[in-house]
């Protein structure tokens, strides 16, 4: 169960990066068009997505790998005081815990929420851009929803 404990942060963080990368990339390109009005069209290329993906993923991987090797989450079972007639514990509960998980969690949250705030700022600044970039409105809504969650 120790492995299952440590997979939860991996899945949450890598899942966030996978879902957030296209939104951040598109918002950044629209923001660049906002800053430079001479740009006539925006083309989202795979190269842009891959670059943004690795920029967001690599710091998270460093945090996760360091966390996994230095202070991984461990499954701990605790027994309640109730005992049956054969002197066995009747109830127990388990949790994933680690003595030093807080710095890793805070670092990951600061980096990911910081990038989400930057993307929301860029979306806010460029929300009045031309109508041919109309999908930016929906991207803005989804990123604000992510920030609220």
Image: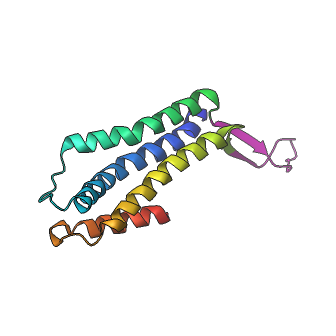
- Colour style of the rendered protein structure: rainbow
| Residue sitting at x 42%, y 66% | 145
* Residue placed furthest toward the top: 69
| Residue sitting at x 35%, y 37% | 54
| Magenta stretch in the rendered image | 73-94
Judge whether residue 91 is colored magenta: yes
Q: Nearer the viewer, residue 65 or 131?
A: 131
Residue 31 image position (x, y, % from top left): 28, 59
Residue 93 image position (x, y, % from top left): 72, 48
Residue 73 location, quadrant: top right
Residue 124 image position (x, y, % from top left): 36, 67
Q: Is residue 70 above or below residue 90?
A: above
Judge whether residue 85 is colored magenta: yes
Residue 132 image position (x, y, % from top left): 14, 68
| Residue sitting at x 15%, y 59% | 38
Q: How many marks?
A: 0
> On the picture, is 31 further left or further right than 114?
left
* Residue placed furthest toward the left: 40
> On the picture, is 31 further left or further right than 147?
left
Q: Nearer the viewer, residue 70 or 24?
A: 24
Rendered-image quadrant of the N terminus: top right
| Residue sitting at x 48%, y 49% | 112
């Amino acid at each position: 169960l120790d492995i299952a404990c440590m997979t939860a942060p991996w899945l949450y963080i890598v899942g966030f990066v996978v879902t957030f990368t296209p939104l951040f990339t598109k918002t950044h390109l629209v923001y660049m068009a906002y800053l430079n009005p001479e740009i006539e069209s925006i083309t989202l290329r795979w190269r842009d997505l891959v670059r943004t993906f690795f920029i967001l993923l690599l710091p998270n991987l460093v945090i996760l790998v360091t966390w996994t090797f230095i202070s991984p989450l461990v499954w701990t079972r605790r027994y309640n005081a109730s005992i049956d007639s054969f002197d066995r514990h009747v109830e127990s509960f388990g949790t994933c815990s680690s003595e030093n998980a807080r710095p890793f969690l805070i670092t990951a949250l600061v980096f990911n929420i910081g990038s989400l705030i930057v993307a929301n700022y860029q979306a806010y600044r460029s929300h009045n851009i031309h109508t041919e970039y109309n999908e930016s409105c929906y991207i803005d809504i989804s990123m604000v929803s992510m920030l609220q969650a």
